Amino acid sequence: NIDPKQLERTGTVREIGSQAVWSLSSCKPGFGVDQLRDDNLETYWQSDGSQPHLVNIQFRRKTTVKMLCIYADYKSDESYTPSKISVRVGNNFHNLQEIRVRNTDHVTVIIYVCGGCCGG
């Protein structure tokens, strides 16, 4: 298993999420972007609306993403853990193309959605 934090400590990868603007299709109070991004496995995003539930990550300029790691813990919150994760890329919301789909398989796992696949 690859530990994304270890890769960051060794300089193999660099966390670039702070360079982006994050938005959600919906969220319950206290379960938004801050909880999604806080590096605490005890906190998380909870949607509060109809599907699809979306996390939008917009970079200010064209950015190449080499790896996207998502922690999903089905045992902690099965009703809010996605069964499928889709990654879409594009220049704006109107030309997004799906490049990867991964099933979570209802387990606790770090899902590596991209491995050099999200070119900018």
Image (spheres, rainbow, N blue to C red):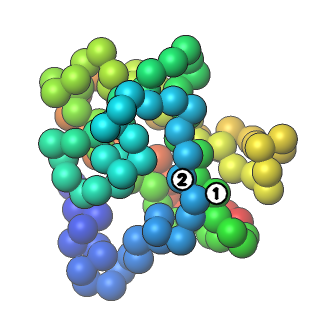
Residue at 33% across, 22% down: 80
Secondary element at image label 2: strand
User: Could you say whether the residue bearing mark 1 is in a helix, strand or loop?
Assistant: strand
Q: Is residue 23 visible?
A: yes
Residue lying furthest front in this view?
A: 29
Quarter of the image for residue 107 reads top left
Q: Position of residue 50 (x, y in %)?
A: 55, 14
- Return the disc, 2 or 1, that comes first in the chain's sequence: 2
Residue for point 84% across, 41% down: 94
Q: Position of residue 6 (x, y in %)?
A: 21, 72
The kind of residue tagged 1 is Gln
Q: Residue 99 falls in which quadrant of the image?
A: top right
Instruction: Quote the CA–CA distance across marks 2 and 1.
Output: 6 Å
> Badge 2 is on which residue?
22
Judged left or right of residue 51, residue 92 is right
The image quadrant where one finds the N terminus is bottom left
Closer to the camera, 73 or 55? 55
Asked whether, in this view, residue 81 is left or right of residue 53, the answer is left
Q: Position of residue 96 (x, y in %)?
A: 76, 43
Q: Are marks 2 and 1 in contact (CB under 8 Å)?
A: yes
Q: Nearer the viewer, residue 6 or 2?
A: 6
Q: Which residue is mark 1?
A: 58
Q: Quadrant of the C terminus?
A: bottom right
- At label 2, the amino acid type is Trp
